[in-house]
Image (cartoon, rainbow, N blue to C red):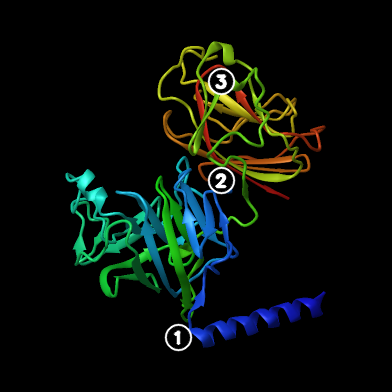
């Protein structure tokens, strides 16, 4: 195996050397023009990104991202892009995370705006105030940076110093230098936008699907010398996680005629309808799972809903593990907080209340290994390696419906 692996790596190295020699400037393709090798869909459907006529194309639906298979630190990336719709929207994420931020379809990172000029005409009140269509740089969902040059009114975006973007369906060329936390964007041959002090400054490259068809080609990258980026400035990798919901439907879930009226897929979010008749109309995975880590975003409505089992609260729900009624991770607006275990003789209350206010998105990180359970809620440990004697070894995951409204998003699992 070692010999075969060495041979394969040598072959890859030779191919890479040939590519570099052919380009003559140290760049290698980041898109081979034939398939999506080197990329993976994060939270989109299998057909959201595809290849045709040497172009990497996004349909724009559902909204989400595709990420590179590996992270990058210091590099120069070049690409050509073309919007096919008036006012079309897309983006290039630098140093992003291959996992959406809680409750949204977008990832933490620094976005390089890819926006058709028609968007400014549709939104004249915001144009050149909080956005432009000419190549903005801005941090999203927890990333940070220092805006420079021409800065947006809110102070968060670097605006281009010159308008260089061509309207749909013309092609535009981006040259983006990303080095030691600084990003310098050139559009169609001239540098126009700069951002400094970016965090993260090591991570994944993502392409965005945001409601409109967009084409990409000639995507290539040149890696620059590393600069020992510390862990706290490095995007989390989330290796091995795959999505349980692709934003287009409820594939992979047992959607029976009985429960279908009470669950609705809507882009990145799917909803359990508030209805007394929905009580116990739970949604189950088709697949069974044993040991795993589960990421699950959820939120309760901001006010009491008709049919809630706890009328004085904003409702409740839960996530059942391994199809075992003794292992239900509680979602509640009661004072004790969410994340506790109910249904088992060894049921545990959460160690602390880590819930955000009703109406806000929360994130569970649930680890089930053997008969031991750990639950983190919004980054805080609320159940710590709790024993669950007699728990089933394997079974489906269930999203529990207690009659009150509940929303889920960004369900990802890593089997252990």
Element marked by disc 2: loop
Q: Nearer the viewer, mark 3 or mark 1?
A: 1
Q: Is residue 268 above or below residue 157?
A: above
- Kindly identify which residue carries mark 2: 45
Residue 119: tell me if it is visible. Answer: yes
Q: Camera-side residue: 150 or 198?
A: 150
- Kindly identify which residue carries mark 1: 25
Residue 350 position, x and y percent, is 59, 33
Q: Camera-side residue: 231 or 335?
A: 231
Drawn side of residue 15 relative to residue 156, left or right? right
User: Which quadrant of the figure has residue 146?
Assistant: bottom left
Q: CB under 8 Å between callouts 3 and 2?
A: no
For label 2, count other residues whose C-alpha is less than 10 Å away and answer few (under 14), some (14-19) or many (20+). some
- Label 2 to label 1: alpha-carbon separation: 35 Å
First in residue order: circle 2 vs circle 1: 1
Drawn side of residue 125 relative to residue 61, left or right? left
Q: Where does the N terminus fall, quadrant-wise? A: bottom right
Which residue is pictured at 55% across the width and 14% down the height? 309
Which residue is pictured at 53% across the width and 88% down the height? 21
User: Which quadrant of the figure has residue 288?
Assistant: top right
Residue 134 position, x and y percent, is 26, 60
Instruction: Please give the label number shown on residue 262.
Output: 3
First in residue order: circle 3 vs circle 2: 2
Drawn side of residue 261 relative to residue 96, left or right? right
Element marked by disc 3: helix
């Amino acid at each position: 195996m070692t010999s075969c692996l060495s041979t394969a790596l040598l072959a890859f190295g030779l191919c890479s050397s040939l590519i570099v020699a052919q380009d003559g400037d140290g760049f290698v393709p980041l898109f081979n023009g034939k398939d999506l090798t080197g990329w993976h869909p994060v939270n989109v459907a299998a057909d959201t990104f595809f290849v045709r006529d040497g172009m990497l194309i996004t349909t724009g639906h559902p909204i989400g991202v595709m990420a590179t298979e590996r992270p990058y630190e210091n590099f120069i990336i070049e690409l050509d892009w073309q919007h096919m719709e008036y006012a079309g929207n897309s983006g290039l994420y630098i140093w992003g995370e291959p996992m959406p931020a809680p409750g949204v379809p977008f990832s933490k990172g620094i976005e390089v705006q890819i926006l058709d000029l028609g968007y400014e005409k549709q939104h004249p009140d915001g144009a050149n105030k909080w956005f432009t269509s000419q190549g903005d740089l801005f941090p999203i969902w927890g990333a940070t940076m220092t805006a420079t040059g021409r800065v947006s009114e809110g102070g968060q975006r670097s605006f281009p110093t010159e308008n260089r973007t061509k309207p749909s369906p013309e092609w535009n060329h981006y040259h983006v230098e990303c080095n030691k936390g600084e990003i310098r964007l050139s559009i169609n041959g001239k540098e126009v936008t700069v951002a400094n002090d970016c965090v993260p400054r090591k991570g994944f490259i993502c392409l965005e699907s945001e409601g409109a068809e967009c084409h990409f080609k000639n995507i290539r990258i040149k890696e620059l010398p590393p600069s020992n980026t510390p862990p706290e400035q490095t995007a989390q990798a989330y290796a091995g996680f795959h999505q349980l919901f692709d934003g287009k439907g409820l594939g992979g879930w047992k959607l029976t005629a009985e429960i279908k009226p009470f669950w609705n897929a809507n882009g990145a979010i799917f909803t359990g309808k508030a209805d007394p008749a929905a009580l116990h109309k739970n949604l189950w995975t088709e697949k069974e799972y044993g040991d795993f880590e589960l990421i699950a975003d959820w939120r309760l409505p901001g006010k009491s809903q008709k049919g809630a089992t706890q009328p004085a609260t904003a409702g409740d729900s839960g996530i059942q593990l391994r199809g075992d009624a003794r292992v239900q991770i509680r979602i509640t607006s009661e004072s004790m907080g969410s994340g506790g275990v109910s249904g088992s003789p060894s049921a545990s209350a959460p160690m602390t209340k880590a819930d955000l206010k009703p109406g806000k998105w929360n994130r569970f990180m649930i680890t089930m290994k053997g008969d031991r359970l750990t639950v983190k809620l919004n980054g805080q440990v609320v159940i710590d390696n709790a024993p669950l004697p007699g728990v089933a070894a394997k079974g489906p995951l269930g999203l529990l419906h207690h009659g009150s409204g509940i929303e889920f998003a960004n369900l990802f699992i890593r089997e252990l």
